[in-house]
Image (spheres, grey):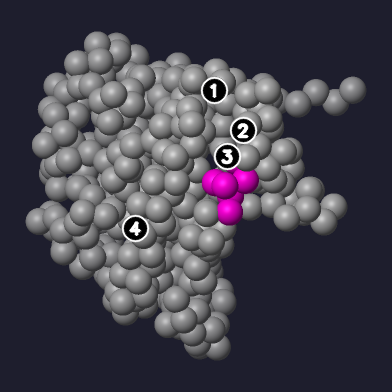
Amino acid sequence: MIEFSEKALKIKPFEVMQILAKAQEMERRGEKVIHLEIGEPDFDTPKCIRDEAIKAMERGFTHYSDSKGVLELREALADHVGDFSSLSIDPNKNILVTGGVSLGLLFALSTITNPGDEVMITDPTYPCYENFVKYVDAVPIGIEVYEEDDFKLDIDNLERAISEKTKAILLNSPSNPTGMFFELSELEEVVEIASKKGIYVIVDEIYSGLVYDRKRSPSILETGYGNAIMLDGFSKLYAMTGWRLGYAISNVEVIQQMLKLQQNFYICPSPFAQIAAIKALCEAEEDVKKMVEEFDKRRKFIVEKINEIKGFKTREPKGAYYVFTNVKTISDDSTELANFILDEAKVAVAPGVSFGSNGEGYLRFSYANSIENIAEGVERIRMALNKFRG
Ligand code: PLP
């Protein structure tokens, strides 16, 4: 028997994708499943972006680009960042265009950690973080965040958890799955601890434009911390999940190291996607505004409907497009409950435990689906739960 590497074996499957696969299998059998599990906008990529990609292909942007990313895109990103932070970002030194936030994170962690180093994450958090950290042979340390604190990170808990081995704090703001985001003052508190301990702060800001009380959530770049790595991307805000495009912003030394990884392991993100992304930054404001307004309507709607279900309790999330719902009075086994809901109600939702052990007793609903589907999905769940309770 051929043995697999320890590295491969220690990576867990991405459970939301497993639920999706099961739901798709049911659909192949002819069942009508409502998808409230997947974190992907149901909107098309705005037309101006799609058109620009086609034009870029015709103009010959079908070959490798500079490994850092197409210069015009890096310049547009530097301007974009200049709109919300006073930092002066050099497109040649501080920016790396990446194959989504996913590859940016892999390169960032590969750049700054050694085997055995600890990386602080919250519990619950985006499930892939744990696997990224393990993949670079570092150790994820989960710091629990609680519903009664609006899932905010307790800075004292963070400080207590930091050890000699800690290399970085990895945060997601706004957060998948909780919808919480860090205010600037809270990021500054994190930075104060990080600079005292001499460690990095990586913030995945992929949902930064998906907030409902302002234009964007505060960025780690606004703190001016030298050892920060900011990751963002086009997937969520511009409905561009399939384009696989993101970017990392950091100090020149970190970007130089990450660039070597990109040169070797990815060469460059798709150049015609990069050219189209310039349009996203410069001309898609109206499209984005409409999508965010629609998400906001769905957010209010789903919170109201979920809270009507006996035993489901959910707070209004402030960002991203997820609600993290407390179902503890119904079940303390969220995987079993999510599977029951999929089998009985034909509604796919994500079990809270897949976001960390402290997410047990919760279900994550994505409202990246139409009001009609959300209404029908929640109603189907309400009916099915009568059976679950017996
Ligand atoms: N980071 C978070 C918190 C996410 O929720 C996701 C996707 O769901 C990603 C990163 C993946 O981003 P990308 O599509 O840019 O690789």
Residue at 36% over, 60% down: 297
Percent position of residue 310, x then y = 48, 31
User: Mark on residue 330?
Assistant: 1
Q: Is mark 2 within 8 Å of ligand 1?
A: no
Secondary structure found at label 2: helix
Residue mark closest to the camera, 4 vs 1: 1
**Quadrant location of residue 386?**
top right
Which sits earlier in the primary sequence, circle 4 or circle 2? 4
Secondary structure found at label 3: helix
Which sits earlier in the primary sequence, circle 1 or circle 2? 1
Q: Could you tell me if residue 110 is visible in this image?
A: no
Graded by Cα atoms within 10 Å as few (under 14), some (14 to 19) or many (20 or more), the crowding at tag 4 reads many
Amino acid residing under circle 4:
Asp
| Residue that badge 2 annotates | 385
Q: Could you tell me if residue 377 is visible in this image?
A: yes
User: Mark on residue 296?
Assistant: 4
Secondary structure found at label 1: loop
| Residue that badge 3 annotates | 382
Residue at 68% over, 42% down: 345
Query: 116 or 348, which is in the foreground?
Result: 348
Query: 68 or 165, which is in the foreground?
Result: 165
